[in-house]
Image (cartoon, rainbow, N blue to C red):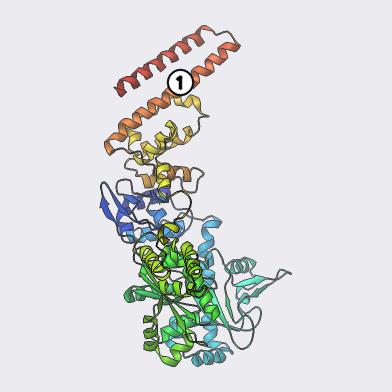
């Protein structure tokens, strides 16, 4: 596959994709009138405001204004690139993406980086088998209790000593070296020469959700700093999105009903060695909301595992603060604090897998951890100490989505402090979310209304032609866009809202069109046609008025000839006729 994906293929792909089926497999939908509904997967809410239209093949959230086609949903929900979303839909539809010849540089960068990383992965694995340092690396892995089977399953490798072991595989080709640098494999010295980022390290390849190598982690053999080293961020690797081992753990997480989040890749591998294969690790960054989104899609419960020391509890508190806004819909988070001096790797090697599982089952729930932590920051034996607890808890509880958990957390706060008004105190300032929906019903200009109606019902283009006199007002904002939309929708029958919007992806008009496509006109399906017709009459009348004003302004500057007078009279009569039509239609 190369080059730009043909528009015709995207149209066919969307025609074969049912957006309701696609979204329902990820976010359970319920029928609500003509459309399907759910609580929005892109923001926390108690009352469903996320709608999916089968006829329009378009989703829209009235709460956060998220909207788009099946392609846009996959890009947002699965964090895919445009091409990756196309690939996934094509695979589901049984279609092969056509080869369109030479690709643009930006189209080929991601696959080229992935190829470079795959080549590096093969190189590192080969070094673990044959390099003279391999005996030391194998000895280290065995001392950590890892079997050859586990090492092979996680594709562990070896970065040899020396500054250019991997760089030499490019054989001096600067294009390959530049690509390796973009992939985070090598770095450039001040003199322009390249050197390997990973040296004298056991290598842990990091995969994306599809199982493709996107980065590496390395553990130093012997003395040296840093002890652990991760690839830098690249176009194919963002630490805030990726989790180590997620591609292998997905099915196990779903089967177990929860995921275990640890701090390092050696912890993940050691747990897998002892039969615990639903563990993942963040990669050199604190847990992010995107990490949580990915894990909660697989199972409703997450157990964070941290060292029991001060640093571990500080990291746990950061994870708690990140997690609070994600706790709607029955989701649960717990914290497992290990004995001092232990990490999951050392504990599971000493105590075994069943002992670790038993400890995890007794992990501290997020509510308990929150109140335990806050209680250590105040004197509960004092009245003002209990008041302080309310003030400390108030902004934290406000982050929890409305629902049973937040109500129960406030109930516990009242029980512990004796303050009976904690829920009223937590109310966040600013406009409520409903204000966004109210804003979506504000009146549009006639031009924006016409565009919005045409987007939501592209078949209107075949039923109504645009008024001819609109062309004389080419400077009218939105006119060229309306004309283009009308032409596209008129030329191609059965075009849906989602498919029409895809024609404008990555254009300046894209964001505006998405908003207009989600506009609620408070109309029944059968009312769109007469409303569109009336809007076109209004546009025609406005265009006539502007043309008449221009002629009258000219008449003040120069004497009219007979043809100009006749034209002005004709325009005035036409405007009068349009006004009568509107008056009769309104009776």
| Whether residue 147 is visible | no
Q: Is residue 376 left or right of residue 521?
A: right
Q: Nearer the viewer, residue 424 or 526?
A: 424
Relative to 267, does residue 551 appear above or below in the rendering? Answer: above
Could you tell me residue 138's position as x and y percent? Answer: 52, 90
Query: Residue at (54%, 77%) from the top-left corner?
Result: 217
User: Residue at the spot x=46%, y=45% of the render?
Assistant: 504
Numbered marks: total: 1
Quadrant position of the C terminus in the picture = top left
Q: From the viewer's perspective, is residue 179 above or below residue 10?
A: below
Name the side, left or right, on which 453 lies relative to 565.
Answer: left
Percent position (x, y) of residue 533?
34, 29
Q: Nearer the viewer, residue 346 or 3?
A: 346
Question: Which residue is at the front of the view, 486 or 24?
Answer: 24
Residue 20 vs 339, above or below: the answer is above
Q: Between 566 and 65, which is closer to the camera in this rendering?
A: 65
Residue 482's place in the image compared with 369, above or below, is: above
Q: Residues within 10 Å of mark 1 (few under 14, many from 20)?
A: many
Identify the residue under disc 1.
544
Position in image of residue 99 (x %, y %) = 44, 56
- Viewport quadrant of the N terminus: bottom left
Question: Outermost residue, right direction?
Answer: 191
Give how far across and how far down residue 386 sits, in percent: 47, 69
SS at circle 1: helix
Quadrant of the rendered image containing residue 149: bottom left
Whether residue 225 can be seen here: yes
Quarter residue 572 falls in: top left
């Amino acid at each position: 596959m190369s080059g730009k994906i043909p528009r015709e293929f995207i149209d066919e792909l969307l025609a074969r994709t049912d957006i309701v089926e696609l979204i329902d497999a990820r976010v359970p939908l319920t029928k609500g009138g003509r459309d399907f509904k759910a609580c929005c997967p892109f923001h926390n809410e108690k009352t469903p405001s996320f709608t999916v239209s089968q006829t329009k093949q378009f989703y829209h959230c009235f709460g956060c204004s998220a909207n788009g086609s099946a392609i846009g949903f996959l890009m947002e929900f699965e964090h895919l690139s445009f091409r990756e979303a196309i690939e996934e839909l094509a695979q589901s539809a049984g279609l092969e993406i056509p080869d369109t010849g030479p690709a643009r540089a930006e189209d080929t960068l991601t696959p080229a980086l992935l190829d470079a990383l795959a080549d590096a992965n093969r190189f590192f694995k080969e070094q673990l088998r044959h390099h003279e340092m391999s005996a030391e690396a194998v000895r280290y892995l065995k001392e950590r209790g890892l079997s050859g089977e586990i090492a092979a399953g996680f594709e562990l490798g070896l970065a040899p000593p020396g500054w250019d072991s991997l760089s030499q595989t490019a054989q001096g080709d600067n294009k390959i070296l530049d690509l390796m640098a973009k992939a985070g494999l090598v770095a450039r010295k001040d003199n322009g020469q390249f050197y390997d980022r990973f040296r004298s390290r056991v290598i842990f390849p990091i995969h994306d959700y599809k199982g493709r190598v996107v980065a590496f982690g390395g553990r130093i053999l012997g003395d040296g700093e840093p002890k652990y080293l991760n690839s830098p961020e690249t176009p194919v690797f963002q630490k805030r999105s990726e989790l180590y081992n997620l591609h292998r753990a997905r099915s196990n997480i779903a089967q177990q009903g929860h995921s275990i989040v640890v701090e390092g890749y050696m912890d993940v591998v050691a747990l897998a060695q002892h039969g615990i294969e639903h563990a993942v690790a963040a990669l050199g960054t604190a847990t992010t909301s995107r990490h949580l989104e990915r894990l909660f899609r697989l199972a409703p419960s997450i157990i964070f595992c941290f060292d029991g020391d001060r640093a571990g509890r500080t990291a746990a508190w950061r994870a708690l603060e990140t997690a609070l806004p994600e706790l709607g819909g029955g989701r649960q988070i717990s914290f497992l604090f290990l004995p001092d001096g232990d990490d999951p790797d050392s504990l599971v090697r000493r105590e075994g897998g069943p002992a670790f599982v038993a400890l995890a089952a007794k992990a501290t729930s997020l509510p308990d951890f929150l109140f335990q932590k806050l209680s250590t920051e105040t004197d509960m034996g004092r009245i003002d100490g209990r008041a302080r607890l309310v003030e400390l808890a108030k902004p934290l509880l406000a982050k929890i989505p409305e629902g049973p958990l937040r109500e129960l957390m406030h109930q516990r706060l009242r029980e512990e402090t004796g303050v009976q008004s904690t829920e009223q105190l937590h109310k966040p300032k600013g406009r409520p979310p409903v204000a966004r929906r109210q804003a979506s019903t504000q009146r549009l200009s006639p031009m924006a209304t016409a565009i919005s109606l045409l987007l939501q019902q592209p078949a209107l283009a075949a039923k109504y032609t645009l008024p001819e006199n609109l062309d004389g007002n080419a400077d009218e904002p939105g006119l060229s866009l309306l004309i283009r939309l009308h032409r596209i929708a008129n030329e191609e029958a059965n075009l849906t809202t989602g498919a029409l919007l895809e024609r404008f992806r990555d254009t300046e008009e894209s964001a505006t069109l998405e908003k207009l496509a989600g506009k609620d006109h408070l109309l029944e399906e059968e009312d769109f046609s007469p409303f569109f017709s009336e809007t076109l009459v209004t546009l025609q009348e406005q265009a006539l008025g502007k043309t008449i004003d221009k002629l009258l302004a000219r008449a003040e500057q120069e004497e009219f000839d007979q043809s100009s007078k006749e034209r002005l009279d004709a325009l005035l009569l036409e405007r009068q006729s349009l006004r009568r039509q509107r008056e009769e239609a309104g009776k």
